[in-house]
Image (cartoon, helix red, strand yellow):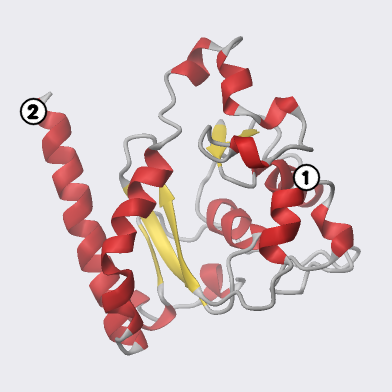
Amino acid sequence: MQELATSQEPWQITGTCYGLPPIRLRRYYSKLHYDAQPLDRDAEQMGDCNKFYKTYSKNSLTGSILVLWCTHAICLGFHSIPVAEGRNDVFSAIYTRFPVAPQVIVYDFACQLAPYCLVREARYFRHTRFLIDEMHAHDHTRCGQACFTSNAMRYDDCIQMVNTSAVECGNKGMKRIRKSVSFMMYGHAIQFTKVFLDIWNRNVINRMAKV
């Protein structure tokens, strides 16, 4: 995903559309043997997470779209994924766009995203907490309790205010266009996704204004 930060082509062609412009490159870490590989399929990279292994070891995974959501279920941006979603997609999207790393990242594979990010950019992510949302936590039977949002909520009032279901709410909305997009040409699919998410954001903001 180095093109995420270097390409000058329009988002209709690159499939990358974020509200924040790229501010740094996604470097390649030559001493990490599997860093240049597009997929997380090597057993050495999967740790002890059963769910991560069962999901990313499948050869049938296809491309999709990664969307970053804030805790209000507002889309911060998206990019197309040609093969299958991996930790690099989340890492690169955040590292190349955000001047300062988020204090909390909620992700269904946060247990594996945390070491992936910290091994590569420990200083940048030094104040970030990686948490698994409550909906997906029950599948992580071999992962540490420190990764569970439900556990963090017991001791941190700030985490209690985080809407961990915002991502699932947004992804559920994306399912509305999944079938339509699958029949479109690439450029049309990207534009259709952009329009859908623009309308989604406007509706969320309007609902918030009425509260």
Pointer 2 residue: 210
Amino acid identity at mark 1:
Pro
What label does residue 115 carry, if any? 1
Q: Quadrant of residue 15?
A: bottom left
Q: Residue at x 74, y 37 (%)?
A: 141
- Answer left or right for 21 relative to 132: left
If you read the primary sequence from the N terminus, does the residue marked by circle 1 or circle 2 appear first?
1
Q: Residues within 10 Å of mark 1 (few under 14, many from 20)?
A: some
**Residue 176 seen anywhere in this rendered image of the structure:** yes
Q: Nearer the viewer, residue 168 or 74?
A: 168
Amino acid identity at mark 2:
Lys
- Answer left or right for 151 relative to 157: right
In the depicted structure, whether residue 210 falls above or below residue 187: above
User: Residue reaching furthest bottom?
Assistant: 185
Q: Quadrant of residue 177?
A: bottom left
Q: Residue at x 83, y 67 (%)?
A: 42
Q: CA distance from mark 1 to mark 2?
A: 41 Å
- Residue 143, given in percent of the width and then of the height, sits at 76, 36
Q: Nearer the viewer, residue 104 or 146?
A: 146
- Residue 81, given in percent of the width and then of the height, sits at 52, 73
Q: Residue at x 83, y 58 (%)?
A: 45
Q: In which quadrant is the C terminus drawn?
A: top left
Q: Nearer the viewer, residue 149 or 190?
A: 149
In the depicted structure, whether residue 178 falls above or below residue 170: below
Q: Residue at x 59, y 52 (%)?
A: 95
